[in-house]
Image: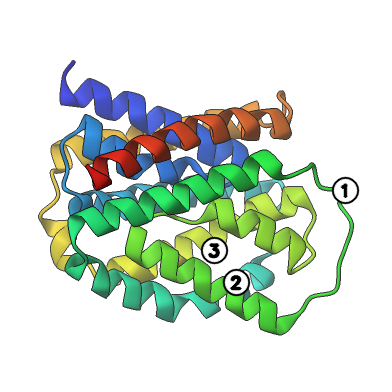
Amino acid sequence: MSALVLALAAGAVIGLALGALGGGGSVLAVPALIYLLGFTPVAATTASLVIVTLTSVTALSAHARDGHVRGRTGLLFAAAGIGPAMLGGALAGRVPEAVLTAAFAAVAAAAALRMLRSRPSADTVVAVRPGRAAAAGAGLGAVTGVLGVGGGFLAVPALVGVLGLRMRHAVGTSLLVITVNSLAALTMRAGAVEGLDWVVVGPFVGAAILGARDGKRLSGKVSGHTLQRIFALVLLAVAAFMLIDAVL
C-alpha cells in the first residue's frame, strides 16, 4: 500500500477521534507515522504536532460555533502549560529514540486505562482549585512538548474534574488548550519542521481535518462513552506493541 493511501487513512481516523472526543486522536498519530510511514520517533513527534495543531484549529471552530468553548478558562489553563511545552519541545531531540518510544507507549497505555475506567460525566459543577489547575496545565504542556501529542485525553478529564466544566464544554475547550500547547512546542522545533516529508504530512493533515468534521457529527449520533471505550481498546493494543518494540 502506498505511503499516500496510508497517510490518508491514518489521518481520517485521527481526525475522527479528535472531532468526536475532543482529543485522543493525536495519540495514534505518532505510532502511525513511525510504523506505517517510516518516520523516526523525533520526526514523528514533530509531524504529529503539526497535524494536531491544524486539525484542532478546525475542530475548535466547529465547537466554538456551537457555543461549547470557554475561551477564558481554556487560555488560563493553557497558559500554565506554555513554558513546559516549549521546554519539552527543546528537549525531545536529545532523548534516545528507544526511551522516547517507551515513554510514549507508557503515556498511551495510561490514557487508554483511564478512558476504560471513566464513567459518563454527571455535568455537575465543582469548585476550581487554582493549584491543581496550574499543575494539570503544566503537566499537559510537558507531555505535549516531549511526546508530540495534543493531550486532549488528559485535558478533558482535567477540565471536568479540576475546573468544573460540563463535558460538552470540556471537549470544546480542550481543543483550545491543545492548539495553544502544540503551537508552543512547535516554536522550539522550527528546524525539524522544515525537514519533514510534506508529501506525506500534507495529505495526512488534509484527511485529519475532514475526519474531524465527520467526528463532530458522529459525536451527536453515538454515545460518547461507547466511542471512548472502542478508542481506548485500540490505543491499549498500540501501546503494548510500541512498548514491546522499544524493549526488544
Q: Which residue is mark 1?
A: 122
What x and y, as percent, mark residue 107?
A: 46, 53
Vertical comparison of 203 with 107: above or below? above
Question: For this rendering, which residue is in front, 38 or 107?
Answer: 107
Question: For this rendering, which residue is in front, 14 or 220?
Answer: 14
What x and y, as percent, mark residue 132?
A: 68, 77
Q: Which residue is mark 2?
A: 136
Q: Which mark is residue 177?
A: 3
Looking at the image, which residue sits at the far front?
248
Q: Callout 2 environment at 10 Å: few (<14), some (14 to 19), or many (20+)?
A: many
What x and y, as percent, mark residue 101?
A: 28, 51
Question: For this rendering, which residue is in front, 154 or 102?
Answer: 102
Dot 3 or dot 1, earlier in sequence? 1
Left or right: where does residue 246 sit relative to residue 25?
left
Which residue type does callout 1 highlight?
Ala
Q: CA distance from mark 3 to mark 2?
A: 12 Å
Q: CA distance from mark 2 to mark 1?
A: 21 Å
Dot 2 or dot 1, earlier in sequence? 1
Quarter of the rendering containing residue 165: bottom right
Vertical comparison of 88 with 217: above or below? below
Quarter of the rendering containing residue 188: bottom left
Dot 3 or dot 2, earlier in sequence? 2
The residue at the point 66 percent across, 76 percent down is 133
Q: Callout 1 environment at 10 Å: few (<14), some (14 to 19), or many (20+)?
A: few
Mark 1 secondary-structure assignment? loop
Position of the C terminus by quadrant:
top left
